[in-house]
Each structure stands twice: as structure tokens, then as C-alpha cells.
Amino acid sequence: MQRFKVSEVFRSIQGEGEAVGLPSDFIRLYTCNLTCSWCDTKYTWVGQDRAIEGKDFIYLTSREIIDRLTKIGNTKHVTITGGEPLLQPIEELVMELKGKGRSVIIETNGTIEPSETLLNLVDIWSISPKTSNSGTKYDYGKMQWINRTKGYYLKFVVVNPSEDIREISQFVDSRGIKDNKVILQPNGVSRNYEKCVTELMDYAVSAALPYRVVPQIHRLAWGLTRGK
């Protein structure tokens, strides 16, 4: 039976994206293939080459993960996130969740093409392409698979509105992506998050942007508290 490297399993409110505000169970998997400077879950990948079982992650089977979810009381929605969850073969886990009537969101950076099984099972793909503000190299060419999903949205972190949104618009326009698929959110690790929210919203209004601005409401409620 497949065992997964798991950072944490918890219940919270979905704090971002299209499902914002909905109670959700979260399965956060360990390891990532990117190292974004503003990542708010670096504990899922910092030191991953020398990660210690029991300290940085624990091994859990899909049955053990579902047992943990059952103990905290099931919600309709489950979010599988990371790190980068597609670095692990999660088909079995998703099949078991769907078999129990759960709605599954996968949060991914978009660089790894999902299997056909996942494309058929997952309800919503929350995809976070990385602009140059992330400090990491990102290959937009690896996102050809997104139009084969049941549903998706793109979630971009904005640090400098005037620069970042120009880059985002160029990508969106070049791919013919509909404006309603695009969500902008402020830099979640900023010391003054409220200021970042205001600056991004002010820019969106002044530039009459066609994209949605959706702050991370879990960040507003709990700051950078882990498991929230």
C-alpha cells in the first residue's frame, strides 16, 4: 500500500481561490520542486534532501489519512496541498476520498502533468503559476494540461502590482485564458499584509483590471499560524 510523506492533516476554512470561505479538510503533503521566495509553507520543503521522518514529515497510508480526517469530523470538501502534491502518486488517495462522497481540490504549481485518472477524478484544480517575483524559474510550457480538467482557476501572488500584473496579463492573453479564471492575491508572507491587500485592490480599481482580487482570509484571521 502506498505511503505518503505528510506534513499535516487538519481542518480549517479554505482561505483562498474560488472555494474561499468553505470549511475544508486539508491534507498537506511534503516536498516541493520549486523554492519560491515568498512561500508561506517552507516547512514542506526546506531541508527536504535531509528531511527526518517524524520531525519534518510522517509516513501515512491513504487509509491512515482518511482515519485522521474521520476523527476530526468529515466536511464535504478536502484540499490536497503541499509543497507540491503531484510529486507523490495520489491517485489511490483521491479515489478513496471520492468514494466517500468528498469533493476534492488539488493545489498545485502546475509544472507536473496529472495522470488521466486524476484529471477525471479531481473536482477543482487550484493552479499557482509563478511569476519572476518568486525568485524561481518557472516553465509555463508545462501547463498545457489545464484545459483537460473538469475545472480550474489560476492563482497568482502579487508583490509589485504594476510589474507583476503586466507579466500575468501577457501570459493569460498569450494562452487565451478567460479573465474569470484568474485570481490575484497579495504576498502572504508580507509583514504588513493588510497594506498589501489595500495596495493590490487600489491598483485593481485604478487599472480596471478584469481579474478578481481575493485576499487569503486565513492569513487575515490567523496570520501565519501553521495548520490554519
Image: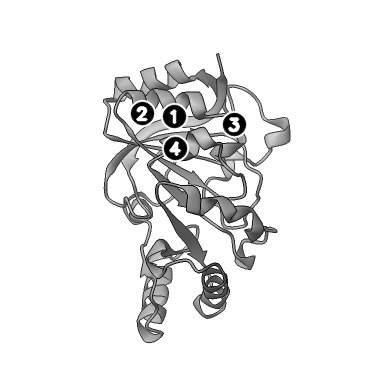
**Residue 126 drawn above or below residue 57:** below
Query: Closer to the N terminus: mark 4 or mark 3?
Result: 3
Disc number placed over residue 120 in the picture, else none = 4
- Report how far apart the C-alphas of labels 4 and 3 lie in the structure: 17 Å
Residue type, numbered disc 4: Asn
Kindly check if marks 1 and 2 are in contact, taking CB atoms under 8 A apart as contact. Answer: yes
Alpha-carbon neighbours of circle 4 within 10 Å: few (<14), some, or many (≥20)?
A: few
- Of badges 1 and 4, nearer the viewer stands 4
- Report how far apart the C-alphas of labels 3 and 1 lie in the structure: 12 Å
Q: Residue at x 50, y 69 (%)?
A: 176
Disc number placed over residue 158 in the picture, else none = none
Alpha-carbon neighbours of circle 3 within 10 Å: few (<14), some, or many (≥20)?
A: some
Q: Nearer the viewer, residue 70 or 51?
A: 70
Query: Closer to the N terminus: mark 1 or mark 4?
Result: 1
Residue 80 appears in view: no
Query: Closer to the N terminus: mark 4 or mark 2?
Result: 2
Residue type, numbered disc 1: Val
Rendered location of residue 214, percent (x, y):
36, 63
**Residue 84 drawn above or below residue 170:** above
Quick one: SS at disc 3? loop
Q: Residue at x 31, y 52 (%)?
A: 20
Kindly check if marks 1 and 4 are in contact, taking CB atoms under 8 A apart as contact. Answer: no
Task: Look at mark 2 in the image and give the residue it sits on.
Answer: 98
Residue type, numbered disc 2: Lys
Rendered location of residue 218, percent (x, y):
35, 51
Q: Residue at x 59, y 60 (%)?
A: 130
Disc number placed over residue 88 in the picture, else none = 3
- Report how far apart the C-alphas of labels 1 and 4 lie in the structure: 11 Å
Alpha-carbon neighbours of circle 2 within 10 Å: few (<14), some, or many (≥20)?
A: some
